[in-house]
Image (spheres, helix red, strand yellow):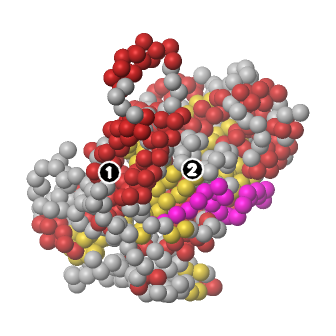
Amino acid sequence: MNKFEALGIEARVVKAITELGFETPTPIQEQAIPVLLKEEKDLVGLAQTGTGKTAAFGLPLIQTVDFQSHHTQALILCPTRELCLQITKDLQSYTKYMQGANIVAIYGGASIVNQLRDVKRGAQIVVGTPGRMVDMINRKGVTLKTVKRVVLDEADEMLNMGFKEDLDMILSETPDEKCTWLFSATMPREVESIARKYMADPFQITVGKRNEGNVNIEHVYYVVHSRDRYASLKRIVDYYPEIFGIVFCRTKAETQEVAEKLIRDGYNADALHGDLSQAQRDQVMKRYRSKSLQVLVATDVAARGIDVDDVTHVINYNLPDEIENYTHRSGRTARAGKTGISIVILNVREVSRVKILERIIGKKFTKARIPGGHEVCEKQLFSLISKIHDVEVNEAAIAEYLPQIYAQLQDLSKEELIKRFVSDEFNRFLDYYKNAPDLNVENRSFEKSPDRGERGERPERSGERGESTRRVPERDSNMTRFFINVGEMDGLDKGGLLRFICDTSNLEGSNIGRIDVKSSFSFFDAAKEVEDFLLNAFKGSTFKGRKVRIDPADSGNGNSGGGGGNSFGSGKRPYGGGEGGWKKKRFESSQDFGGGNSSGGNSNGPRRSKFAKKSH
């Protein structure tokens, strides 16, 4: 008997998934499928990204649906378009031999008219992103009163993206008597809260420890100066000639900037972020899945739903703002039982964060050195030799040319021929890395004490009511904190504010550090050397018709007071809305964004100032 049949999966579905290459259930599938098939229960399933969660809920889900009915019986909510499309594609594959199955994807960036039409044809399963689902409900284009199963996939990310109100609204449209299945790679407090609110005594399945990383992933970090971050990225990519990887950046602006630099420097790369149209995103992913691209540069949100089994490396160009999201990033590699490497490029002040990561994922990191020019050349040389040795010769096609080839090369010995052939391809690497500098930051004061961070950060201590509070990094002395009188009420999030700052000032995103968006105002860090430039750039600026002003937050003009306003904690733990209260619940990144380009990058054409963005 097939192993999936033994779990209770019916023959038609087994036939479909066997054609897809399913042979042995993963641990999450092995534990979840029998429970979801036999019991009308809510369920929380925790497992790392890439361990088969879609099949864990998808296979039992399609067996609970009556595909002869035209009513919507199951709703799957997920955070991004890419993941929505991937889940839909997977379920359509699983139901290949099931008559009448209609599974519809509802997501932004595509025609809502077409999606309304597809649902009205009788969609038994709807897979949607929260924002577009709210639109569909408001247009009365989808009826959820007949839903018997709700799946919340990547619930943590939906909450991180600000979809809590949308989730509340959508779930209020579903019947009280339904089963809710929540699947996630991590289980922060916010997800526990949503489980308590929407689920009744859920059955819990945990594969590995909470937030633990995939056991097949090797975790490596490098320490470099911020100015050398891009040069280090290129060096790492060159050191792994067969790399098929994803580079994660913090913002959409930085993602586009890094991708453009790589393309200009001759790398087979492209960007994936939220500012691309759906058609552009689809085209990028088509090229990546077909391996026409070797390196994909992406934001955290855009990368959700990338279901590519052969990713060899994940490179964290910067650590995520939410440190727990490292698990999601690293989970893009080592999928389907394969192995992979997750790399983090750190500056000196970030080294203490490695210990936090190790606690979260339950794995040790290896500190490595950025390879030198000689090491890179050696790796490239033997990769070339291996390709030549293993190349498949098309005897029939080349036969007619061989006599002339032999005649032209007859005066060369075998040794001379090998040297010339290899050198023709290899000389460019030798020339490029001939005088390559050492990009590593040697062990210095930042490793003085295992108990204290590089800048003397205090170890964790007990907060109110015995709760543990995470370390908050000290402010970067190379950064100035600015107040700006726009915020969430103006429709801005962190990414939107960063774009507005960069567009108004013509600065590169690398000059901007931590951003905190409040209700009617915000704070952001910028490199001290651009302070005057930034203040001048914003004189007379407006946003949606309203005059915008910025001031240094420590200027004593009243904008930096620690009082009043927003509370980021709960209960009796108010954190002031101003500069006096940065002790937020989450560990915030405090990265070193130095001005100027990294070594190895191109600088073409004049600039308005040495800090301004390139004109493309």
- Determine whether, in the image, residue 409 is placed left or right of residue 184: left
Q: Residues within 10 Å of mark 2 (few under 14, many from 20)?
A: many
Residue 309 in sight from this viewpoint: yes
Q: In which quarter of the image is residue 4?
A: top right
Identified by mark 1, the residue type is Leu
- Nearest to the eye among marks 1 and 2: give it: 1
The residue sitting at 14% across, 71% down in the picture is 532
Q: What stretch is highlighted in magenta?
A: 200-222
In magenta stretch: residue 209:
yes
Q: In the image shown, does 145 or 270 lie closer to the viewer?
A: 270
Distance from disc 1 to disc 2, alpha carbons, whole Å, reads 31 Å
Question: Dot 2 lies on which element?
Answer: loop
Q: Mark 1 points at which residue?
A: 430
Identified by mark 2, the residue type is Thr
Question: Dot 1 lies on which element?
Answer: helix
The residue sitting at 46% across, 15% down in the picture is 399
Q: Where is residue 280 in the image (x, y as percent from the top left)?
A: 38, 35
Q: Where is residue 434 in the image (x, y as percent from the top left)?
A: 29, 56
